[in-house]
Structures are given as structure tokens and as C-alpha cells.
Image (cartoon, rainbow, N blue to C red):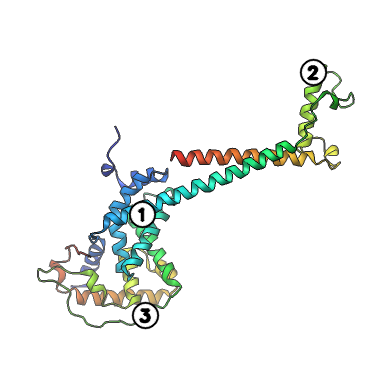
């Protein structure tokens, strides 16, 4: 008797989806849809655009499921696809803002000590936010980000460093709370 | 917090997927788009198969195989074969010639039958491939 879909590992589901299994792929969408949508919003995409790109990413992933190698996780793979798709979308209007749009550095920790990464990211410039999200959210290396964003490697490194510095300042006194989940409406 | 402590912490924060109240709708949208893409692919393959089939039939109707006894000549036949065998041999030779695989000298005479056979065969193959692909996509 076949195992229920929820009992299958991502790699098994991806293998079945590579053979055209839409139900199996649907299970992957159920498992990772929120992570992809969340990543795109953290990269700075408006909710409607984020969802649109996330859907495109999943459709592309379904087409390319046979190319998925289980060296990494499916979550990392789909996030990279989504991040690259989003960069392509915005590259037409490529004008990464170098400076912070908002410079307030008030800690974004709620009354019970939970940190809000999404809120903290709003304090970064568009370029810093993109670079930090691509690096720590999508798992791209600095050279990969430089190539994807068509920026010099040194610029990417400084964006990531400045972005992390700002996040560190905003997420203080976070060590106790840094494991809590964030919620997006 | 030092950078060494902060980097793993930020990785963990990014790894936490936010909860969306409309996740079900998102999943339904993806499923709908997948189905739509699949229907479009099936339709495109069906149209390609139909077109290939029509071309194949048309080309087959245009081909004149000349397989009747009138096409037999003593010069062309193999002397050691009996009549039926010779006819079969001639038919095969004729097919080879028409498909461009026969005697180079005969092919050089500019007969159009070889091209017709080529296109007919190609049409049939395209139709068969398209039909197979449609069937496969439907099974999937």
C-alpha cells in the first residue's frame, strides 16, 4: 500500500513530481509555499508580486523537477529559483537603493521578547535587504549574488555587512528571543 | 551580540517560514496554473499530431509506388530469382530508390518519388511520435 503523501520525504515527492505527479508536487507546494512567499516578501516584494513570483517559481520547479538533485534540500532549491525569478522581474527597473530608506533603529522586539525579522528588514535599504535575504534566506553565495544582481563582489559584501550590522542593532537584545517564529498577515 | 553569535541566529530566523492565512488559496492557485499548463500542452501536442497526420495522409495519397507487375523488367531483376521473388525484390528496390537509398545513379536522375516517400515517412513518424506524446501526457 502506498504511503500517504505527508509521510513521503521531499526527495521522494520531487522524484514522483519529476514523473509528472501533480498531487505529489502539490504536497511540496503545501510544505514550502509559505517559506518561498515569506522569502520574497523579506526581499522586499509587495505581497501580490511576491505571490505571483512564488507561483511562477513553483511552476518552473515542476518543469525542472527532474533536475533537482538531492544534494541540497528541496526548500533551498525552490528558494533559489524564486529569488532568481524575483531578481529577473525587478532587474528591468534595476535601481537598487544604496542608502537606507528609514534610519530608525529602534529594537523590533515585542512585549514578550519575540523578534520580528520582517519588521527589522524594513530598516535596511533595498540593496542591503536584497543582499542579506539572498545570502541568508536563499542561500546564495556572495559571488552568486554579485552575478545575479550585476553588482561588483565588493559592493555585495559591503551591502551584506551593513545590512547585518543594522539587523544586529535592531534585533537587540535578541539572543533569548531569536528562535521565535514571526507571523505575517 | 557578536557577529559570530549573530550569523547563526539570523540564519535561524530566515529559516522560519511565516504563517500565511491564505496558504490554501495559494496552493489552489498553483494547482490551477499547473492544470492549465498541462491542458495547453496536451492541446498543442494534439494539434501537432493532427497536423502531422494530415500531412502524412496527404503525402501517402500522392505517392505512386509502381509496385504492379508492369514495373518489372528483366534487366532490373536478379536473374537467379523466381518471378515472385523478383517482383518482391523489385518492389524493395523501388522503395529504396524512392526513399533515396537506392542506386546512386538512379537517384541522380532526379526522380521526385524519393522525396515524396521521405516526406510521407517523416509525416508518419511525426504523427506517431505526437500521438505517443499525447498519450503519455494524458497518462501522467
Disc 1 crowd, CA 10 A, few/some/many (<14, 14-19, 20+): many
Alpha carbon distance from label 3 to label 1: 32 Å
Q: How many marks?
A: 3
Q: Residue, x 87% and y 27% (percent of image)?
A: B76
Q: Residue, x 79% and y 38% (percent of image)?
A: B113
Disc 2 crowd, CA 10 A, few/some/many (<14, 14-19, 20+): few
Alpha carbon distance from label 1 to label 2: 64 Å
Residue nearer the viewer, A166 or B64: B64
- Check disc 3 and report its element: helix, strand or loop: loop
Which residue corresponds to mark 1? B30
Asked if labels 3 and 2 share a chain, the reply is: no
Up/down of B75 relative to B21, above or below: above
Which residue corresponds to mark 2? B84
Residue nearer the viewer, B121 or B10: B121
Q: Would you say A30 lies left or right of B85 here? A: left
Q: Would you say A143 lies left or right of A102 here? A: right
Which residue corresponds to mark 3? A97
- Check disc 1 and report its element: helix, strand or loop: helix
Query: At which x and y percent is residue B54?
Result: 64, 41
The mark found on residue A118 in the picture is none
Q: Quadrant of the C terminus of chain B?
A: top left
Amino acid at each position: 500500500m502506498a504511503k500517504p503523501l505527508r509521510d513521503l520525504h521531499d526527495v521522494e515527492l520531487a522524484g514522483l513530481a519529476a514523473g509528472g505527479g501533480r498531487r505529489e508536487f502539490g504536497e511540496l507546494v503545501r510544505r514550502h509555499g509559505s517559506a518561498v512567499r515569506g522569502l520574497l516578501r523579506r526581499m522586499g516584494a509587495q505581497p501580490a508580486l511576491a505571490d505571483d513570483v512564488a507561483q511562477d517559481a513553483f511552476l518552473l520547479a515542476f518543469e525542472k523537477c527532474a533536475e533537482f538533485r538531492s544534494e541540497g534540500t528541496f526548500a533551498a532549491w525552490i528558494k533559489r529559483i524564486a529569488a532568481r525569478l524575483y531578481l529577473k522581474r525587478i532587474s528591468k527597473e534595476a535601481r537598487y537603493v544604496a542608502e537606507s530608506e528609514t534610519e530608525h533603529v529602534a529594537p523590533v522586539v515585542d512585549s514578550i521578547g519575540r523578534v520580528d525579522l520582517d519588521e527589522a528588514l524594513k530598516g535596511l535599504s533595498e540593496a542591503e535587504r536584497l543582499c542579506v535575504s539572498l545570502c541568508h534566506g536563499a542561500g546564495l553565495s556572495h559571488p552568486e549574488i554579485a552575478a545575479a544582481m550585476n553588482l561588483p563582489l565588493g559592493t555585495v559584501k559591503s551591502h551584506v555587512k551593513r545590512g547585518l550590522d543594522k539587523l544586529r542593532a535592531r534585533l537587540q537584545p535578541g539572543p533569548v528571543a531569536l528562535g521565535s517564529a514571526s507571523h505575517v498577515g | 551580540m557578536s557577529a559570530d553569535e549573530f550569523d547563526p541566529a539570523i540564519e535561524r530566523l530566515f529559516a522560519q517560514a511565516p504563517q500565511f492565512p491564505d496558504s490554501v488559496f495559494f496552493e489552489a492557485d498553483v494547482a490551477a496554473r499547473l492544470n492549465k499548463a498541462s491542458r495547453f500542452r496536451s492541446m498543442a501536442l494534439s494539434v501537432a499530431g493532427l497536423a502531422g497526420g494530415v500531412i502524412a495522409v496527404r503525402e501517402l495519397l500522392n505517392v505512386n509506388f509502381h509496385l504492379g507487375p508492369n514495373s518489372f523488367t528483366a534487366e532490373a531483376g536478379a536473374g537467379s530469382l523466381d518471378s515472385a521473388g523478383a517482383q518482391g525484390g523489385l518492389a524493395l528496390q523501388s522503395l529504396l530508390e524512392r526513399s533515396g537509398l537506392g542506386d546512386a545513379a538512379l537517384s541522380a536522375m532526379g526522380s521526385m518519388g524519393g522525396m515524396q516517400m521521405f516526406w510521407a515517412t517523416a509525416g508518419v513518424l511525426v504523427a506517431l511520435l505526437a500521438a505517443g506524446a499525447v498519450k503519455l501526457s494524458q497518462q501522467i
